[in-house]
Every structure is written in structure tokens, then in C-alpha cells.
Amino acid sequence: MRMASIGVFIGLLAVPAQDVAAQASDSILDFIDGRYEETAEIARRIWEYAEVGYQETQSSVLLQQSLDAEGFSIEAGVANIPTAFVASHGDGGPVIAILAEFDALPGINQDAIPARLPIDGKAAGHACGHNLFAAGSIGAAIAIKKWLQNTGTPGTVRVMGTPAEEGGSGKVYMVRDGLFDDVDIALHWHPGDRNSAAASTSLANRSAKFRFRGTSAHAAGAPERARSALDGVEALNHMVNLMREHVPQETRIHYVITAGGNAPNVVPDFAEVYYYLRHPDATVVRDIWERIEEAARGAAMGTGTDVDREIIHGNYPLMINETLALMMDEKLSMIGGVTYNDFEQSFAEEIHASFDRPSLPLGSQEEVQPYAVGQGYFSTDVGDVSVVVPTVGLSTATWVPGTAAHSWQSTAASGMTVGYKGAQVAAKTLSLAAIELFGNPALRAAAKAEFDRQRGGDFRYEALLGDRPPPLDYRN
């Protein structure tokens, strides 16, 4: 089946120029269909590995090996991140990069069945579907590479193996190290419960762990000799909760106490709280963050403790490029949605019945949602990519309609054919988008002009996480 598809590619060279574009589209889709089993196998293996951020050793090796076998040149361990890589094929420009995420989420796991069933001994799961993200992206890259070869089209396709999206900001370090400097356009996608190329921006964010240190003593026998690090954490949390009334309404602040002591009768001499701050504007994030740091210093002063903080990650908001988004919507509409077989329909019905108030009806996975421009209330390190190179993405129905990300239902679908089919839709759409971009210099120029207008002439990239090295142990 694969050899037949490659033959179709070669056959393109013998057809009139005006028919090449249409036949190229058909042949690249046939080729991706012919690789379905390979794509599914990669997705399933990464789902089983379920490796968290900066620890995705097996997942990264699998992806690199798959691309190496297809003739891509591999640069591993980029940006001082052992699991990050860049895989390239082609020569010269334009350079089209495809992002590939592959980290799992800690604290959730689920078998690939339509009822709640954690897998014993498993500490993480692909509740955000990054196993599908990786598999779909490299499927697209391999198809584009074949098309470039067999049509003689100049240009380079590049896979950016980007670890630790979930709170680790892997792409930020890659951007900061200049790995996107020669890229003309960046393409990405994400698993979801619907097919959409809507131009949605995201929230800028910053996170840090605040660590308080005090003096321990017997809580009943010698309380006057103690200074509670937990008091410092609680004082900070109280002040930040008061602050919520006095920040812009789009602000999101959330935290979790990651260390607070071990016994009630021992005053804790160490406590830690992990904060996230989000807002649509990176400048506002910087301003509010200063207030949180001032509150931390005040909490330490008031409780007789010391405090330090470690910035963990920071992301810019996604910068919309409508020139590219409208093109991506057109390509997604050409591909269409996901059709379930009888087994998948039964699986989907059971999953759908588990929702209290599903946001989408069953059957909508076959549709493409209307194009729109809006604000998304999520954060992603793709935002940093989007402010250094024109960037566009889409989402596909890898999950049952109505599924929330970071849920057992999304984890279940990500490990079976419902998810794999959605990844195929993404691979096909990305491939058609890349063909358009390689062959349409006017589109690339329009996208770059919009990018320059949006960003402004005086923009200088400065990572929100500063100059810290990658936090390779942040999931330990």
C-alpha cells in the first residue's frame, strides 16, 4: 500500500503543471492513509510510555528513530534538553517547521476503555493527547518530505521535537537558543473534541515555586521558639487571595501547596507553594507578578521566615495570524472530520454518557466547526514560537465530542482508534497546508507582513522565564 502511494508521487512528475496541485493533494492523502498503522503504533507506544516533561526519553528516541529511518537528519539534545530534537529534510528555503509534543501529565492515568479504570502502578497519562500530537506531526512531516523529493520542490521540512509543554516550557528554551531563527512558517496542532482551525489566542503565563524556611520546634512544648514556614506560605496565599479583587478581570491565579510539613506537632521549618499567573497580555503578567513577589517578601517578614523563589516557566500568548488561519481552515474543510466504525461508535456513546453536560453532541466529530477569532483561556509555549515566526495551528476530534482535556475520558480516547483517526486528520491537514506554503510565495509574504504588523517594529524577544536553564527536574 505504501509503495503504491509512492508511485503516485513519482507519477506527478509526468502530468501537466496545472494538474499537479490537485494530484499532489490526492497523493499525499493516500500516502498518509497508507501509513495509518505506523502512525497508530507510534501513538500507542508513546501513550504506554506516558513520560512526563523532560523525562520523555523513550518517546523522544522512538520519534527520532522513526524520522531517521525516513532519511531525516537528526540533531538531538538541543537547547540543553536531553529529550529535545530537531529533524530536517531538504535543502534551503522556504523552511516549514512542524511542532511535535510528547509529554504526559502526572497524577492521572486511565486504560483505553470507556469506563473509569486507572492502570495499576502508572503515575501519569496522556490526558492532553500529546502522544497523538507527536505521531500526527511526524506522519505529516514524512509525507511532506516524500512530496518535496518527488516533485522536486525546493525547501526544507523540519520537525521540532518539543518536550515538556505541560508546565515546562520546552519550546521557550528552543526559541531562546535560536532554533527557529531560519524558519519561515511554523505549523502545529492539538488533540481536542472538535475539528477547528479557529484563530484563538491564549493567555500569557508565568509560574514559580516559593520556598519558605523557618525554625522547627515542638508545637506545644516550645511554640515560642519556632517560626513556621507554613505560616509564610499561608500568609502569601491569603494576601494573593485578597489581591484577586484588585487585578484585571481576565487574570487567572492558581496555586497548590507542594510541601507543608509532616506532623501537626512539629512546626515545619520548610514549606513550598507553586503558583501560576495568567493574563492575555504578557506585560500585565509581568506587572502582577511583581506584586506577588512583593507579597512573598511581606509574608516572610511578617512570619519571621525567609523566602526564595524559582521561576519554573513562562509563556507568551499565541499571536494570531489570520492569513495563515484562513488557509488552514480551508485545508481542514477539504479533509473533513472523523467517522467512527461500530466499535468506535459504541465506545463514544459510553464516554458521552459519562458527561454531566456535554458541550458538543455525538456526531459533531464528523464536522468542521465554523471559523472564528477568539480568546482562549489556556496557556501554551507555542505562544513563544508565534512571536518569533508566523505560526498557525488547528485542533482535531481525537476525543469524543464534549470531552474535556486533562480528563480520564481524554486519556482513554488518546490510547485507541478514536484518537488515531483524529491524528490522521491533523496529518493530512498539515500536509496540505505545507504544500500550499511551499508553492505559494505570495501567501508566505502576506503572512510575514501580517506577522510584522502584529508584533510591531520595536519588539525584542525576552523570555518570560528569564535566563534560567531548563528545569529538567521539575516533575521529580
Image (cartoon, rainbow, N blue to C red):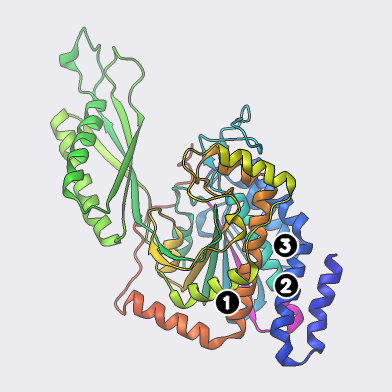
Check contact, mark 1 vs mark 2: CB within 8 A. Answer: no
Q: CA distance from mark 3 to mark 1?
A: 19 Å
Q: In front: mark 3 or mark 2?
A: 2
Q: Residue furthest top?
A: 221
Amino acid carrying label 2: it is: Ile
Residue 332 vertical position relative to residue 115 in the rendered view, above or below: below
In the picture, measured across the screen, residue 102 lies left or right of residue 253, that is right
Q: CA distance from mark 1 to mark 2?
A: 19 Å
Give me the residue at 81% from left, 71% from top.
5
> Does the magenta-highlighted stretch encompass residue 365?
no
Amino acid carrying label 3: it is: Asp
Secondary structure of the residue carrying tag 1 is: strand
Q: Position of residue 334 (x, y in %)?
A: 63, 72
- What segment carries the magenta color? 145-163
- Residue that mark 2 sits on: 28
Q: Position of residue 81 (x, y in %)?
A: 53, 53
- Residue that mark 3 sits on: 68
Q: Position of residue 13 (x, y in %)?
A: 79, 86
Q: Which of 29/140 is in front?
A: 29
In the picture, measured across the screen, residue 279 lies left or right of residue 381, that is left
